[in-house]
Amino acid sequence: MPSQVPEVGIDQVPADAVLLDVRESDEWEAGHAPGAVHIPMTTLTGRLGEVPEAAPLYVICRSGGRSARVTEFLNANGWESVNVAGGMMEWARAGRPLEGAGSGGAPEII
């Protein structure tokens, strides 16, 4: 039986949440949430010592797929993490703040 990944919508992410952004560096540089911690999913296992100890830790990617896999992995290894449904696409649609320099110089989600 597949395990259930804890998940919340953008409206349930507190303003002071600790976010772990698991997108690749080009995605991060184009636009990300202020204060988020960036550890790409592809480098996560080698950087576990950098994963915040926040409980819960909100894990985010572009649309929610990669972050769901990372959430499942982290929870199986002792963290209390929650996937952010819809990812940074929903974050931007909801009007949450962004930092970064997209192709036009303004933050964007790619």
Image: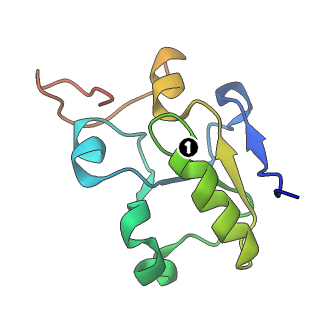
Residue at coordinates 62% horizontally, 37% vertically from top-left? 15
In the rendered image, which quarter is residue 30 located in?
top left
Residue 51: x and y, percent?
A: 53, 72
Q: Quadrant of residue 16?
A: top right
From what the image shows, is residue 77 above or below residue 15? below
In the image: residue 17, left or right of residue 101: right
Q: Colour scheme used in the picture? A: rainbow
> Residue at image x 41%, y 42%?
34
- Up-down relation of residue 11 to residue 48 (above or below): above
Is residue 39 at least partly visible in the picture?
no
Q: What secondary structure is found at the residue carrying circle 1?
A: helix
Q: Position of residue 11 (x, y in %)?
A: 70, 25
Q: Which residue was labeled with disc 1?
A: 65
List x then y, in percent, for residue 42. 38, 66
Identify the residue shown where x is 69% and y is 62%. 72
Residue 100 quadrant = top left
- Depth check, front residue: 36 or 15: 36
* Vertical comparison of 107 with 23: above or below: above
Crowd class of label 1 (few under 14; some 14 to 19; many from 20; radius 10 Å) = some
What's the amino acid at mark 1? Gly
Picture quarter with the C terminus? top left
